[in-house]
Amino acid sequence: MTALTEQARAKVNLTLRVVGRRVDGYHDLESVVAFADCADSLTLDPASETSLTTTGPRAQDCGAAEDNLVLKAVQQLADRVEGLRSGHFKLEKHLPVAAGIGGGSADAAAALRLLARLNDIPLDDPRLLDAARHTGADVPVCLGSISCVMTGVGDSLLPVALPRMPSLLVNPRHAVATRDVFGQLGLKPGSLRIGIADVLKGGVTWPAPDAPAENWMRLLVAGSNDLEAPAVAIEPIITDVLAALRAADGVDFARMSGSGATCVAVFEDSDAASRAARSIQAANPSWWVHAGTLG
């Protein structure tokens, strides 16, 4: 059988609200998630043994192969599907790691999609979804890689019809550990970060599927990322990234994605995003910069 290939698209949190911390230690979130047009590439060559090699410009940042979420995802699905066929995975790594855009989670989700194709498993098979949940918090949303509102610990997904948005992603090449950012947030188990009235009200009312793009843009512009301040306390350079994005001509809004340090800006048109990308890259040659589209 010929090799199979999947793209592992970057996940972008356009808004992120931390509702509270559960008694089991996990944090409940509410986030509008979109997917970018930049991605890693994962190929599966069917074989009797499962293995992984990593290539590409970010390969040196991935660490030991045995710690990679791709292999964790394979094991999680193998625990649920008797006789699962697998093989040799080749990961071409382009996305920065520990960057708040779900690179490792997207790779793991791509591995699950490849295994589903190889083993004729439907993408809505409960075993596939359960394996995704147990691999990592962002893996379920990356499994479908469609825009949605993500709530709970990442396990509740409501697909939404986001407009296509010209965008710019910038990472200063400083890795930020998600655990450290949540630790800086400082919520104790069983505590809420928002008022009880907000909980009872049920949160934000999202635009209808046929709502005009302006409705979504107003909501996104008014949004925020509750992890931005604690991430800045750990890596102050995030402030410089946000300042560069917010100073660009034609920008609608800019904020950090996930737990950082990648920041995202949405622009009025693609030309404005491209001009900003060239300017920011010229001023900061070591930064990772990608101009493209979110949706």
Image (cartoon, helix red, strand yellow):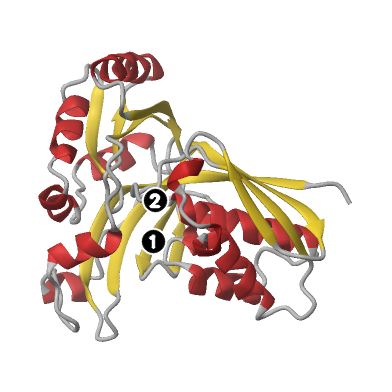
Place of residue 269 in the rendered image (x, y in percent of width and height, measured from the top left): 36, 20
Q: CA distance from mark 2 to mark 1?
A: 7 Å
Closer to us: 133 or 104: 104
User: For the residue labelled by badge 1, is the local secondary structure a helix, a strand or a loop?
Assistant: strand
Q: Residues within 10 Å of mark 2 (few under 14, many from 20)?
A: many
Place of residue 257 in the rendered image (x, y in percent of width and height, measured from the top left): 30, 46
Q: For this view, does 248 lie left or right of residue 14?
A: left
Q: Residues within 10 Å of mark 1 (few under 14, many from 20)?
A: many
Closer to us: 236 or 200: 236
Place of residue 2 in the rendered image (x, y in percent of width and height, measured from the top left): 86, 47
The residue beneath circle 1 is 150
Residue 277 lies in what quarter of the image? top left
In this view, the residue farthest toward the right is 1
Q: Which sits earlier in the primary sequence, circle 2 or circle 1?
A: 2
Residue type beneath disc 1: Met
User: For the residue labelled by badge 2, is the local secondary structure a helix, a strand or a loop?
Assistant: strand
Residue drawn at the location 29% of the way across and 65% of the way down:
29
